[in-house]
Image (spheres, rainbow, N blue to C red):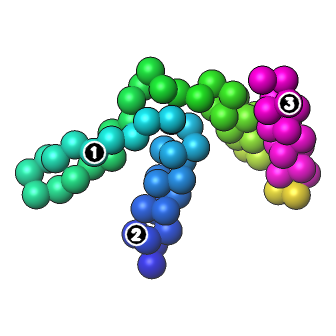
Amino acid sequence: VVGVVAHLALFFALHVLFVEVGTVKVGPLSVAAPAWASLDVRAAGVSAVAFVLLFALKQPLGRTLALCALLGALLRGLS
């Protein structure tokens, strides 16, 4: 169960933060490899704000989600 949750978290993080995500074969494994040039700076910024709010400022999850949703909507509206 932990492996499935970790895989989903990594999958969603890669696909939110990067526009292009490919795969690289490493022996018998296929590993996700983001195109670093396709980093979505806005998504990375919102993620950084969420990290600071949760871990540095010890803000509650609900408040953090609301603030990050508002920030994301504002950033999306500006582009």
Q: Amino acid at mark 2?
A: Gly
Query: Do the numbered discs 1 and 2 sit on residues whose CB atoms are within 8 Å?
Result: no
User: What residue would you read off at disc 3?
Assistant: 77
Amino acid on which disc 1 is placed:
Thr
Q: Nearer the viewer, residue 75 or 51?
A: 75
- Write the start and end of the magenta stretch as one range: 63-79
Q: Nearer the viewer, mark 1 or mark 2?
A: 1
| Rendered residue at 84%/23% (across/down) | 78
58 vs 20: above or below: below
Spatial separation of the CA atoms under disc 1 and disc 2? 19 Å
Query: Count of labels shown?
Result: 3
Residue receiving disc 2: 3
**Residue placed furthest toward the left:** 27
Residue 47 at x, y percent in the picture: 68, 38
Quarter of the image with the C terminus in it: top right
Q: Is residue 68 magenta?
A: yes
- Along the line of sight, the residue nearer the viewer: 72 or 2: 72
Q: In this rendering, does residue 68 appear at all? A: yes
Write the residue at 48% across / 26% down: 38
How many C-alpha atoms fall within 10 Å of the one at disc 1: few (<14), some, or many (≥20)?
A: few
Q: Is residue 22 left or right of residue 52?
A: left
17 in relation to 9, above or below: above
Question: Which residue has dot 1 on it?
Answer: 23
Q: Nearer the viewer, mark 2 or mark 3?
A: 3
Tell me the SS state at disc 2. helix
